[in-house]
Image (cartoon, rainbow, N blue to C red):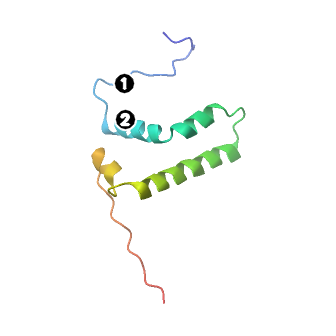
Amino acid sequence: MSSDPVPTLFSMAKRPSRIDLLELDIDLRLADLWREAGEIGEWNLEVVAAFIRAAYGKGYCDALMEDSPGRLCEEHGYRVPGRAATSAKG
């Protein structure tokens, strides 16, 4: 039983969806950022922007360190996007 007047946690379906599992996986990867977010006393646009940049950077670094490129997508049943074509500069 929550002490909050408005529920902040909602029950999950008996079988979580692909997106539920992907969100959980990403939340676990961002645990340090979530911990820091809980310590912020005053949120403003600069703080939010810093957290967005940090999360993007963390995801970028995680992707570079994967043993198998696209593993996160594959594990959650998503198509692995192809690499963008590079243009020759001359």
**Front residue of this view, candidates 8 and 57:** 57
Q: Which residue does the numbered mark 1 point to in the structure image?
A: 12
The answer to whether mark 2 and mark 1 are in CB contact below 8 A is yes
Q: Quadrant of residue 38?
A: top right
Helix, strand or loop at mark 2: helix
User: Which residue is farthest bottom?
Assistant: 90
**Front residue of this view, candidates 6 and 70:** 70
Name the spot of residue 32 as percent of width and height, x first.
55, 38
Q: Quadrant of residue 79?
A: bottom left
Mark 1 crowd level (few <14, some 14–19, many ≥20, 10 Å Cα): few
Helix, strand or loop at mark 1: loop
Q: Quadrant of residue 69?
A: bottom left
**Front residue of this view, candidates 9 and 74:** 74
Q: Is residue 64 above or below residue 17?
A: below
Residue shown at 56% from the left, 11% from the top = 3
Name the spot of residue 28 as percent of width and height, x first.
45, 37
**Type of amino acid under label 1:** Met
